[in-house]
Image: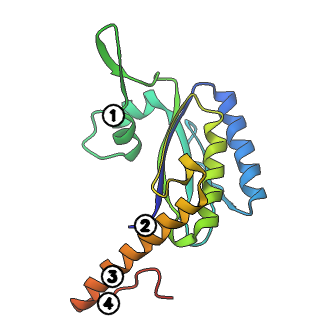
Amino acid sequence: MGITIHYRFGINDEKALDRLLSKTKELAERLDMEIIEFELGKDVKSLIISPHVDCENVSLVFEKWGSIKKKWGNSKEWNYQYSVLSGYKEEFNGKISDLFDPDMWVCADFTKTQFAGDITHIKVCLILRYVASFCSFVDIYDEAEYYETLDKEKLLENFGENARLIREVADVFKKMGFKVKSGFDG
């Protein structure tokens, strides 16, 4: 529970993807965000950004759509990227097929910003807008409505409403005898 930004990207050009990740890393560092470095495999290109101690990471993990489909398409195991991205279909000449070319680099993830506050949320939106500027496919849903509107008043209203809802749920559990820390208890 808490304000979350959901993001999906697709980019066709590997050199453009390398530039995107390099330039996004520079931007994140200018915004005083920590970069988490580790290798995810030779066929995966990634940048993991820790915006704030109370915020989930922004995980920009790109892999070719064909590779994701091959690994997860017939698997009994669940994979977030495959599950989310396989729903994107298009109709061409009466046939329904994947929206993504097998060689397209794709990314799908989400970041919860609720407990890091509005300034961190705005910074995460800035990072995602920058990433989107490089991509040919972009689908972003911001539960605080800031990414879409750039309206700080709407952002604050949504943060306040969500915090109120979290407190109400926590209070119900407390009345039932559970020990609960809602994230707003200090």
Q: Are marks 4 and 2 in contact (CB under 8 Å)?
A: no
Residue of label 2: 2
Q: Check disc 3 and give the amino acid type.
A: Ala
- Quadrant where the N terminus sits is bottom left
Q: Check disc 4 and give the amino acid type.
A: Lys
Residue 170: mark in rendering = 3
Q: Check disc 1 and give the amino acid type.
A: Gly
SS for dot 4:
loop
SS for dot 3:
helix
Nearer to us: label 3 or label 1:
3
Q: Earlier in the sequence, mark 4 or mark 2?
A: 2
User: Image point 69% across, 62% down: which residue?
Assistant: 33
Q: Are marks 3 and 2 in contact (CB under 8 Å)?
A: no
Residue closest to the eye, 38 or 185 = 185
Q: Are marks 4 and 3 in contact (CB under 8 Å)?
A: no
Residue of label 1: 87
Q: Earlier in the sequence, mark 4 or mark 1?
A: 1
Nearer to us: label 1 or label 2:
2
Residue 86 seen in the figure:
yes
Q: Residues within 10 Å of mark 1 (few under 14, many from 20)?
A: few
Residue of label 4: 179
Query: Could you say where residue 132 lies in the image, as x and y percent from the top left?
Result: 61, 38
Query: Could you say where residue 160 lies in the image, as x and y percent from the top left?
Result: 48, 72
Q: Earlier in the sequence, mark 3 or mark 2?
A: 2
Q: Earlier in the sequence, mark 1 or mark 2?
A: 2
Q: Are marks 1 and 2 in contact (CB under 8 Å)?
A: no
Q: Earlier in the sequence, mark 3 or mark 1?
A: 1
Q: In the picture shown, does residue 149 fall above or below 112? A: above
Q: CA distance from mark 3 to mark 1?
A: 34 Å
Q: CA distance from mark 4 to mark 2?
A: 19 Å
